[in-house]
Amino acid sequence: MSYEPPFTITSKILNLVSQISEALAKIEMQEHNVITPYLRKINRIKTLAGTLEIEGNFLGEEKITAILEGKRVLGTVLELAEVNGAIKAYEKFEEYSSDSLTDLLQAHKILMGDILTTAGTFRRVNVGVGGQNGVTHVAPPYDRVPDLMHDLFEWLKKSDVHPLIKSSVFHYEFEFIHPFSDGNGRIGRLWQSVILYNYKKVFSSIATESIVRDYQDNYYKALEDSGALGESTSFIEYMLEMILEAIKKVGNEVGNKVGNALTDNQMQIVQNIKENPKISAKKLSNIVGISVRKIEENISKLKEMKIIDRVGGTRGYWEVLE
């Protein structure tokens, strides 16, 4: 293997990898019971909103949810194209092979297809990356990009570095190369998540991009600090912290669900709603054998737990989410 990205494995990195591994193990113990399609959907929406907001698209979770539901949403042509491209690119999230350059190029084509005529192909111009103080990084010449990307993917395939570290190194090196004329940040974050998913399937339910969005200034600082040092160590430490926080957030959601096991009355309510989504509180009261007020209290609790949701108003119906 000829190419070796420069970085140092510090005690902080080792400690973060250990903490992440422990946090993942706790989630995986409950994965089949509590990481539901609904939770994956919610975290995918958070992921989409997070990665787009970093790039200045603020349509947000509510409008992204509406677009996913086929509803009409107001926004600029560019904003809507960015959202639709991101939705399509992440729809194939579980199909991408993390060590396939062909898959990455296809992901970029899907992501930016309605925005760039050159989507899915490497840039053909030299570029500088701007920051608050002007140009902060001059990317390698465009004619070197194909070879640099080939070398990076060869390293990705053959390196025995821990996947948590490897994903962060790749993310930094990708942004350093800056292989596309636009969309590099979004693809870099997507591909780190793909590498993590290929490592542990539970990452399909972990919205790391939304945590990066919450600490966006530190994201750019970590990129700049690593660029100044000529190695990705600072960026690795930053990304591992973001991954750990994202896992803890999901862990709290999982813990809440485990700690809020359904009562017999609540299970009866859910079962009857499944059988008759338009069932009334009065009818549930007669079936379950508790007062209408108690039925309504339990329904409120089930809604808080994201077990059921109301679609429409008084003439609408109940939907069981899990």
Image: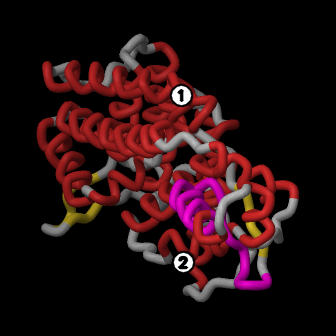
Residue 146: image x %, image y %? 51, 38
Above or below for 205 versus 3:
below
Residue in the image at 73% along x and 84% along y: 314
Task: Count neighbours of disc 2 (C-alpha within 10 A) and say few if under 14, some if 14 to 19, many if 20 or more.
Answer: some
Q: Nearer the viewer, residue 54 or 295?
A: 295
Left or right for 237, reference 273: left
Which residue is at 65% across, 66% downward? Answer: 291
Q: In the figure, is residue 47 to the left or right of 15?
A: right
Asked whether the viewer can see residue 203, the reply is: yes
Residue type at mark 1: give it.
Answer: Gln
N-terminal of the two: label 2 or label 1?
A: 1
Residue 296, position as x, y percentages in the image: 61, 69
The stretch drawn in magenta includes residue 301:
yes
Instruction: Give the foreground label among 2 and 1.
Output: 1
Q: Which residue is mark 2?
A: 79
Measuring from the top left, give residue 35's x and y in whole percent.
58, 38
Element marked by disc 1: helix
Per the image, the residue denoted by label 1 is 30
Q: List x then y, in percent, for residue 6.
A: 24, 25
Identify the magenta region. 295-315
**Quarter of the image with the N terminus in it:** top left
- Is mark 2 in CB contact (under 8 Å) with mark 1? no
Say which amino acid is labelled 2.
Glu
Residue 282 as seen in the image, left or right of residue 163: right
Q: Is residue 163 magenta?
A: no
